[in-house]
Image (cartoon, rainbow, N blue to C red):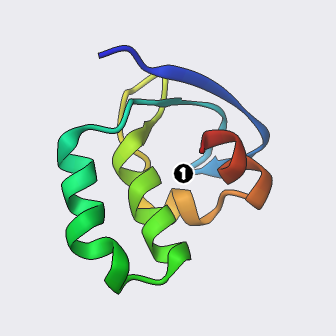
């Protein structure tokens, strides 16, 4: 699956490393089902955080960003990822 490499306008520090670039995978049918089942029950910011935590990962380790890391994103970084 082809991922999109996104340079974050601001970046953030997480567990002693600066994260300035993130890979984002395309939305799958599973993600669409998740949004259809749970999306309307969640506040928008929770839905966005959860979706980014499902899609975004670090380029070096390919670890998904934890919700803690997604919460550290500035609004500009979130917008860049979306």
Q: Nearer the viewer, residue 48 or 36?
A: 36
Classify the position of the C terminus by image quarter: top right
Q: Quadrant of the N terminus?
A: top left
In the image: residue 1, left or right of residue 17: left
Of residues 17 and 3, the one nearer the viewer is: 3
> Element at badge 1?
loop
Q: Would residue 3 appear left or right of 5 to someone viewing this image?
A: left
Quarter-of-image position of residue 74: bottom right
Label 1: which residue?
15
Q: Say above or below: 21 vs 71.
A: above
Q: Who's the residue at 20% across and 71% down the image?
A: 37
Residue 4 image offset from top left, x and y in percent: 52, 21
Q: Residue at image x 19%, y 56%?
A: 33
Residue at the top extreme of this rendering: 2
Residue displayed at 26% across by 49% down: 31
For image coordinates 44% across by 48% down, the residue present is 65
């Amino acid at each position: 699956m082809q991922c999109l490499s996104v340079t974050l306008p601001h970046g953030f520090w997480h567990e002693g490393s600066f994260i300035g670039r993130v890979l984002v995978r395309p939305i799958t049918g599973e993600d669409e089902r998740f949004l259809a089942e749970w999306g309307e029950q969640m506040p928008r910011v929770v839905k966005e955080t959860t979706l980014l935590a499902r899609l975004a990962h670090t380029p070096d380790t390919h670890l998904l960003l934890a919700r803690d890391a997604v919460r550290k994103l500035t609004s500009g970084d979130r917008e860049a990822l979306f």
